[in-house]
């Protein structure tokens, strides 16, 4: 039986060393990283079954790392954070995390949550049908071909700018999840948000004008007022 590999990402080395003891005792293979960039580099070289990801880290934080990971990977992610309000948890889960644990925590709880997520992940992977194509993302009649960098709606080709394509692809990879304007901006522009909200809104409006029959009553990109945008059917 394959040994499960867990990637632990936290800039607090004491936490990493403590959890390493507990996971090693349970027979898991543990990989370590101390910021989001190191985590992404590790994922390029290693097969990982589960990620434990701290939110507040230097160089690249857990929020940006989670969004980047979710572009093409579906292993479970447990987020750790000293911020432990309900809104923080909702934000973490809306990014694509599968679980959220506040600091300080009991290491045994982390191990138990990891085991639970791994059980679901392995069962889901066994039951998941084969994908038609790794580079095609589809929602109803909207098809995004990431290899050809093409978008079509009901068979009709749509011309998007590179930035518009990137936004639409990001929403498609997080289908059904609400992404805030700040999350979209930070993920694609890789710079401080500041007044980036207006920039994102303009791009969303332009995308809607190209893919929607009626941009005022969008079928694909939905606005969640006060939160952000998602690729989903109207409620």
Image: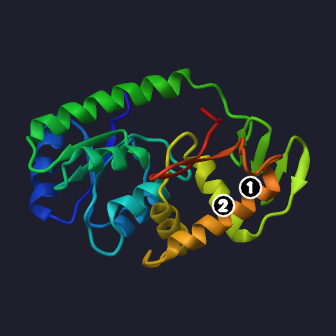
> Which residue is labeled 2 in the image?
204
Query: 65 or 133, which lies in front?
Result: 65
Q: Is residue 13 left or right of residue 128?
A: left
The quarter of the rendered structure image containing the N terminus is top left
Q: Secondary structure at mark 1?
A: helix
x and y percentages locating residue 2 in the rendered image: 38, 33
Is residue 18 visible in the rendered structure shown here?
yes
Where residue 110 is drawn, which disc sits there? none
Locate residue 81: give its quadrant.
bottom left
- In the picture shown, does residue 108 fall above or below 225? above
Determine the CA span between mark 2 and mark 1.
6 Å
x and y percentages locating residue 197 in the rendered image: 52, 69
- In the picture shown, does residue 230 fall above or below 119? below
x and y percentages locating residue 84 in the rendered image: 18, 49
For label 1, count other residues whose C-alpha is less than 10 Å away and answer few (under 14), some (14-19) or many (20+).
many
> Which residue is labeled 1 in the image?
208
Q: Given contact means CB atoms under 8 Å apart, are the residues at marks 2 and 1 in contact?
A: yes
Is residue 42 visible in the rendered structure shown here?
no
């Amino acid at each position: 039986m394959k040994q499960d590999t867990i990637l632990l990402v936290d800039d607090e080395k004491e936490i990493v060393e403590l959890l390493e003891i507990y996971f090693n005792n349970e027979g898991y293979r543990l990989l370590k990283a101390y910021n989001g960039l190191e985590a992404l580099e590790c994922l390029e070289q290693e097969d990982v079954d589960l990620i434990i990801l701290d939110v507040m880290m230097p160089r690249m934080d857990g929020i940006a790392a989670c969004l980047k990971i979710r572009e093409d990977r579906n292993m479970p992610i447990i987020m750790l954070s000293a911020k432990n309000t309900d809104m923080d948890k909702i934000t973490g889960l809306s990014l694509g995390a599968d679980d959220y644990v506040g600091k300080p925590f009991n290491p045994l709880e982390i191990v138990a949550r990891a085991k639970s997520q791994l059980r679901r992940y392995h069962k889901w992977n066994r039951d998941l049908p084969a994908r038609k194509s790794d580079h095609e993302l589809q929602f109803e009649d909207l098809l995004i071909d990431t290899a050809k960098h093409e978008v079509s709606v009901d068979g009709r080709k749509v011309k998007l700018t590179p930035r518009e394509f990137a936004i639409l692809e990001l929403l498609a990879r997080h289908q059904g999840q609400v992404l805030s304007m700040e999350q979209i901006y930070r993920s694609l522009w890789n710079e401080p948000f500041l007044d980036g909200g207006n920039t994102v809104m303009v791009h969303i409006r332009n995308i809607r004008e190209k893919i929607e029959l009626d941009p005022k009553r969008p079928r694909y990109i939905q606005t969640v007022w006060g939160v952000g945008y998602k690729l989903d059917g109207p409620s």
